[in-house]
Amino acid sequence: VQADTLLEVNNIEVIYNHVILVLKGVSLTVPKGGITALLGGNGAGKTTTLKAVSNLLHSERGEVTKGTIKYRGEDIHERDPAELVQKGVIQVMEGRHCFEHLTVEENLLTGAYTRKDGSANIQQDLELVYTYFPRLKERRKSQAGYTSGGEQQMVAMGRALMSRPETILLDEPSMGLAPQLVEEIFTIVKDLNEKEGVSFLLAEQNTNVALRFAHYGYILESGRVVMDGPAAELRENPDVKEFYLGMS
Ligand code: ATP
């Protein structure tokens, strides 16, 4: 393991309902300080990979049947998600998952639930979230269920930040958002990466935007990594251009 490696997924297989083999030996590495993109079409296995890491497959009757998952060299396979949050790894699920009846600010505060370092620090982090997401500050008293899709994506990301993560697993942040908002969200990801040192593993169908903001990419097809490389190289690769960037 290299000193700067945070997450190391090695040759994992995932099976749903005891029979459906969905990941067929996926390996990937997330270095400290990087934005790593997991790309591929609908059903390629991106969400399954993230959920395997954060141990969220059980409720979907999925299990990792082969391979290893390590964080900072330590085996984290089957760790309780709350324990992973303590270790600095948190997932932002696809589809935002806000508490709709709570206000924006109450949603953000739920993200601090694993912390034991006192309300002054939590208040300080809330302010930090608001500096990255000024829209959330404006809407902090609004009921989350009545905010826009883009704002809910920001709430989900802001809530994750409240746990002071080292690594965020971000599932399909662009989903259902207008291009300008997608740009806004990815710019915030880049800022968080550069200024706060947060590392990202992000799953995206929008190859174009992901490869502009990520440092490194993995392309999944039918549960296998078919290509990986620095984002700048993938952007220039003829197959990626033809099949994923739509401009052969
Ligand atoms: P999407 O962008 O649609 O989320 P994805 O690349 O994230 O795509 P996954 O959601 O990981 O893909 O799904 C990979 C495959 O696993 C798909 O064929 C999907 O139908 C299947 N799958 C996902 N969840 C389950 C489940 N709970 N039970 C059975 N099969 C599932």
Image (cartoon, grey):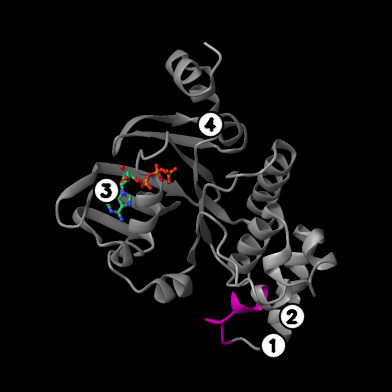
The x, y position of residue 189, in whole percent, is 65, 49
Name the one closer to the observer, 210 or 57. Answer: 57
Asked whether the beta carbons under mark 1 and mark 3 sit within 8 Å of each other, the answer is: no
Q: Amino acid at mark 3?
A: Asn
Q: Which residue is mark 3?
A: 10
Tell me where the magenta segment starts and ends, as one range: 108-116
For this view, does 93 lie left or right of residue 142?
Answer: left
> Mark 1 vs mark 3: which is more N-terminal?
3
Q: Amino acid at mark 1?
A: Ser
> Mark 1 vs mark 4: which is more N-terminal?
1
Label 4: which secondary element: helix
**Crowd band around label 3 with a 10 angstrom C-alpha radius: few (<14), some (14–19), many (20+):** some
For this view, does 22 lie left or right of residue 148?
Answer: left
Query: What type of secondary structure mainly makes up the magenta span?
Result: loop
**Crowd band around label 1 with a 10 angstrom C-alpha radius: few (<14), some (14–19), many (20+):** few
Which is closer to the viewer, label 4 or label 2? Answer: 4
Label 1: which secondary element: helix
* Separation of marks 1 and 4 at Cα, in angstroms: 40 Å
Q: Residue furthest top?
A: 248
Q: Which residue is mark 4?
A: 207
Q: Which residue is mark 1?
A: 119
* Separation of marks 1 and 2 at Cα, in angstroms: 6 Å
Q: Which residue is mark 2?
A: 123
**Crowd band around label 4 with a 10 angstrom C-alpha radius: few (<14), some (14–19), many (20+):** many
